[in-house]
Image: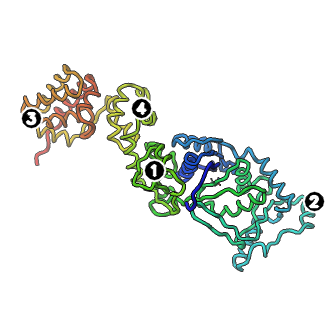
Amino acid sequence: MTTTLSGPVRVRFAPSPTGNLHVGGARTAIYNELLVKSLGGAFILRIEDTDRERSDDAKTRQIIDAMHWLGISVDEGPFLQSERYARHSERAAELLSKGLAYRDFRSSEAIEEVRKRAHAEGVTLKSLAPEPTAEETERRLAAGDPSVVRFRMPEEEIVVHDLVRGDVSFPAEVHEDLVILRADGSPTYHLSVVCDDIDMAVDLVLRGEDHLSNTPKHIALFRALGATVPRFGHLPLILGADKKRLSKRTGATSVEEFQSQGILPQALYNYLVLLGWSPGDDREVMTKDEIVAAFTAARLGGSASVFDVDKLAWMNTQYMVNLSDDEFMPQAKTFLPAVGLAAEANSERMARALTLHRVRSANLVELAEQVGIYFSDEVEFDETLSRKYLRKDENLVSHLTELSRRFATSDFTVDALDGVLRALAEEVGVGAGALIHPTRMALSGSKSGPPLFDLVALMGSERTEARMAQYGEYLAALPPEAEG
Ligand code: GLU
């Protein structure tokens, strides 16, 4: 940002519910929220559902849910723009009656033709397509001809004092009169957005750079409607790995997709905050309280940032390890029904399993898959590894049988189980590893995971016994290796 801001501020996030919440939109929402948290004021949520063909209630719901999931809270709203049609029409009528807007009977195709010619000739649209005269307007209105209402743009330079980009000038020649009411009487985006910002007393508009070219139009409308022009800031785009605007080509783009990939909301929030802002020191993993305390609009950057999925994955592992149980567990549990563990989600054993495995999984999807071993009766053993264990200890089957027998009479604590295994290894003259690795395979079907005795203790005596017996049978039945 180029200017230091003072508060309080009234800001808004104004998504159009035509799809899921894009991470770019989420970042805009987050910065607006942070502005209010750092400067005081109010954060308004306004759903811009005026494009009824592309908007629907389910998408509105999804956007609100995604914001809620990310932990973004608003002070006012959600308001639905579509419920404010009457007000928008009223303000258009006011502009008409003041002579600041006019009726235009030309079709958009006809105007497009003239625009092309104007472009080719390097002249303004208006010089080739002047406004209809008063007589023409009267005659065609009386004849019932369809018309749009066009707002007359001032013939002067408009400078956007952009809080992120500095001054951006739009010379008089680029302005074109803009449609504010369509032929069916419905208000257009430009009119609605300005009317609502005025009525909601928004005094700072922080939005995506894709709206920068709309801003001179909006400034002119604010002035024509007799309102104070808010301050504006336009945030640079988020780019994909291909350095083009982030899109499906390079992977996930919506908050929902990251949610379903098992990313924690706190990690995504933290990651998005850093995509265009920095605390001014080398901190990266920051709680929301720390972010709020460090946030100043002056450090919002003006250049585009690349969305780095590896960095997000790294950020997520930080939160997998460090997030408080209160915040972590409810998120983790939402992934359990998908792996058939809905019924166990609130058990004591599940809490222990999640705690043991959260530090060993990259995300909540992986975590849910990992904890399945404590609740299922199916283990798949790895043949190659099993043969390797057998080569190391030709009496492995009988050693495992004995180990299982001893486990059965042991306390199921980490220390006791550890003592039992080591004592047996020593007695039979093998290294502890020769028993540890096969026992892990017996219980989890894997060669890696949490410390073995944590795993055994959590598995419990009954399942441990059953799996070790099952693995013993599997080993005994392995067909002999082909010579060679
Ligand atoms: N509804 C617009 C959009 O989703 C945003 C309008 C604005 O922020 O002014 O792109």
Tag 3: amino acid: Val
Location of mark 1 (residue): 271
Query: CB atoms at circles 2 and 1 under 8 Å apart?
Result: no
Residue 216 appears at what percent x and percent y?
A: 69, 64
Classify the position of ligand 1 by quadrant: top left, top right, bottom left or bottom right.
Answer: bottom right
> Which dot, 3 or 4, sits closer to the camera?
3
Helix, strand or loop for disc 1: helix
Q: Quadrant of the N terminus?
A: bottom right
What label does residue 358 carry, if any?
none
Binning the other alpha carbons within 10 Å of mark 3 as few (below 14), some (14 to 19) or many (20 upward) gives: some
Nearest to N terminus: mark 3 or mark 2: 2
In the image, is 72 to the left or to the right of 221?
Answer: left
What label does residue 340 carry, if any?
4
Location of mark 2 (residue): 142
Nearest to N terminus: mark 4 or mark 2: 2
> Which dot, 2 or 1, sits closer to the camera?
1
Location of mark 3 (residue): 430
